[in-house]
């Protein structure tokens, strides 16, 4: 693609680094920004810079947060005896949108994937185990994507947490194998949490 400006070319190159954005879409976005008021573009730039510089991860559950402890973990209205284990922040948002869950979360930060060189030590597993040691938690819900990586991660985590006297369940598989939680509709996802099943039943069935 030929550009009439090096500045334009550099901006398109940066936008095209975003997931799912090709050069043509990047060019369209850059030209759109050029047509906006300078103040509007500056607000956009400032918001992204502020996000990158000031965002934190909750020291309890590792969800993205504005404070050291996120609003969910610090809320007295949440059921802290129930932890929903998810892959990333997008899954927390998806489950919260169902309005069917009132416990807290634990964000792993990925899934075990030997093909991609991701092992248990690359995930937030140790901090999950630490959360179980004081006896407050009565149930863990594995809400991971119905993929080979998701199932591998659940199998590993189950072996780590079964030593504790807690219920271990997984979301009901109304979600097709290979499905990512963030793309599941809210009704299906909400129902899968409400109708969760003991983990042993999910692997025997």
Image: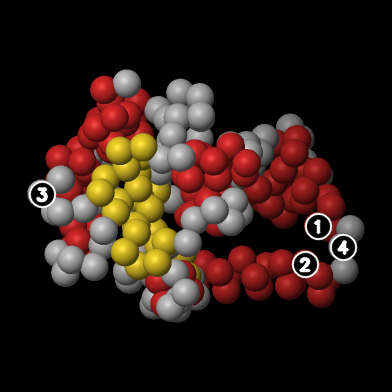
Q: Secondary structure at mark 1?
A: helix
Q: Earlier in the sequence, mark 2 or mark 3?
A: 2
Residue matched to label 4: 36
Q: On the rendered structure, is 10 left or right of 78?
A: right
Q: Are marks 4 and 2 in contact (CB under 8 Å)?
A: yes
Q: Is residue 94 above or below residue 82?
A: above
What is the CA distance from the residue labelled 2 to the residue labelled 3? 54 Å
Residue at x-position 51% and y-position 29%? 174
In the image, residue 135 lies at what x, y percent?
Answer: 18, 66
Horizontal and vertical percent for residue 116?
Answer: 31, 32
> Quick check: marks 1 and 2 in contact, CB under 8 Å?
yes
Q: Is residue 116 shown left or right of residue 174? A: left
Q: Earlier in the sequence, mark 4 or mark 3?
A: 4
Query: On the rendered image, what quadrant is the N terminus found in?
Result: top right
Residue 145 image offset from top left, x and y in percent: 43, 35
Which residue is nearer to you in this view: 72 or 22? 72
The tally of labels here is 4
Q: Residues within 10 Å of mark 4 (few under 14, many from 20)?
A: few
Residue at position x 43%, y 78% in the image? 76
Name the residue located 46 percent from the left edge and 23 percent from the top edge: 177
N-terminal label among 3 and 1 = 1
Mark number displayed over residue 163 = 3
Residue 91, percent from left and from top: 49, 49
Q: Measure the C-alpha gap from mark 1 to mark 2.
A: 7 Å
CA distance separating discs 4 and 2: 7 Å
Circle 2 sits on which residue? 41
Disc ID at residue 33:
1
Q: Are marks 3 and 1 in contact (CB under 8 Å)?
A: no
Q: Residues within 10 Å of mark 2 (few under 14, many from 20)?
A: some
Of badges 2 and 3, the one in the foreground is 3
Q: Tell whether label 4 touches label 1 (CB within 8 Å).
A: yes
């Amino acid at each position: 693609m030929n550009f009439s400006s090096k500045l334009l070319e550099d901006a398109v190159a940066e936008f095209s680094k975003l997931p799912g954005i090709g050069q043509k879409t990047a060019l369209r976005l850059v030209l759109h920004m050029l047509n906006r008021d300078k103040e509007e573009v500056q607000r956009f730039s400032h918001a992204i810079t502020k996000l990158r510089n000031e965002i934190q991860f909750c020291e309890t559950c590792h969800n993205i947060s504005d404070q050291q402890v996120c609003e969910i973990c610090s809320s007295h209205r949440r059921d802290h005896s129930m932890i929903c284990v998810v892959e990333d922040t997008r899954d927390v948002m998806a489950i919260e949108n169902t309005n069917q869950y009132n416990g807290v979360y634990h964000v792993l930060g990925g899934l075990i994937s030997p093909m991609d060189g991701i092992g248990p030590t690359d995930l937030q597993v140790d901090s999950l185990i630490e959360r179980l040691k004081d006896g407050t938690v009565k149930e863990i819900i594995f809400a991971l994507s119905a993929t080979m990586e998701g199932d591998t991660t659940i199998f590993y985590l189950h072996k780590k947490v079964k030593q504790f006297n807690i219920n271990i369940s997984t979301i009901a598989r109304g979600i097709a194998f290979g499905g990512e939680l963030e793309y599941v509709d809210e009704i299906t996802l909400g129902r899968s949490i409400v109708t969760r099943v003991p983990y042993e039943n999910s692997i025997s069935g």
